[in-house]
Amino acid sequence: MRVVILDSPDSVSRFAADQVCCLLNKRRDKRLASVLGLATGGTPIGLYKELIARFQRNEISFQNVDTFNLDEYVGVAPDSPLSYHYYMLDNLFKHINIDLSRTHIPKTDGVDLNESATVFENAINRAGGIDLQILGIGSDAHVGFNEIGSSLGSRTRVKSLTKRTRQDNARYFTSIDQVPTLALTMGIGTILESRSILLLATGAGKAEAIRRSIEGPITASVPASAMQLHPNVTVAIDRDAASELANAEYYLTSELNRTLVSRSS
Ligand code: PGA
């Protein structure tokens, strides 16, 4: 795993935007489509702002891009400001030149949820798989809505949200009782099939989850620890999220060496 410790949440957003731009521009030069896996929540907002700014400066185009979002609540209509459909439109899609028919968010409204999960998985396969999956992390180390105990081989399916996740997300709702109890989420097995993964975390509230995910054993009790199984994962975090890592010095040195190696080659 590449662990990149940065000074601030803004630096994490800029680093993440660099990774996305690099992928999109490289593939555009080869006339290939890019397939992005996207996340919602507070963490990627800065990344999306940065991508919009770069799009406005003509540094990036989303013309030949497919996107797949990790998850959607069950019981929240797509046009509700609380849905992840709305979040993506509001925070990214309506500001860039993406073809909305190429954006995919698990459908949960008025559909058979199991069928919807299969449709979603099939769409990822038809697009040729995900080139780069962006992930946030829950304070309990969930990724997507793969809560504690999720099978490391799980596919897109319905999951019950834990009390902790519902408490964490209650800030977007009027009260915790309004927070849905179910979501349709990409599985950990699905996420691990992405060709590369970029996990983002900022703030001290994520420090324990980050430590357990990166330096602890791989276990379904810490869903993000499954990322240790993937050969191409970058974890980009700010100093606060890194504050409980035992090997922070080593990660900082490794990054420094990486810069030196790339400069000398
Ligand atoms: P956050 O959520 O970015 O709002 O902290 C992350 C997550 O729950 O995956």
Image (spheres, rainbow, N blue to C red):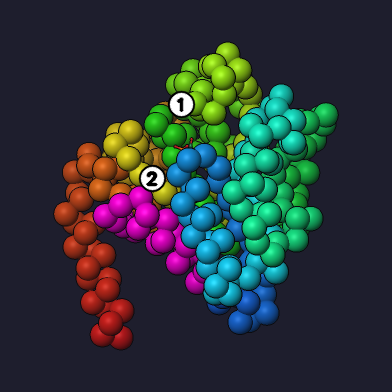
Q: CA distance from mark 1 to mark 2?
A: 15 Å
Q: Earlier in the sequence, mark 1 or mark 2?
A: 1
Left or right, 20 with respect to 251, comes to: right
Q: Secondary structure at mark 2?
A: strand
Residue 54's disc number: none
Q: Which amino acid, mark 2?
A: Ala
Question: Quadrant location of the N terminus?
Answer: bottom left
Residue 168's disc number: 1
Left or right, 186 with respect to 166, comes to: right
**Quadrant in which residue 106 is drawn:** top right
Residue tagged 2? 201
Where residue 232 sits: x, y (%)?
44, 60
Label 1 CB less than 8 angstroms from ligand 1 = yes
Where residue 91 sits: x, y (%)?
59, 49
Q: Secondary structure at mark 1?
A: helix
Label 2 CB less than 8 angstroms from ligand 1 = yes
**Can residue 129 be seen here?**
no
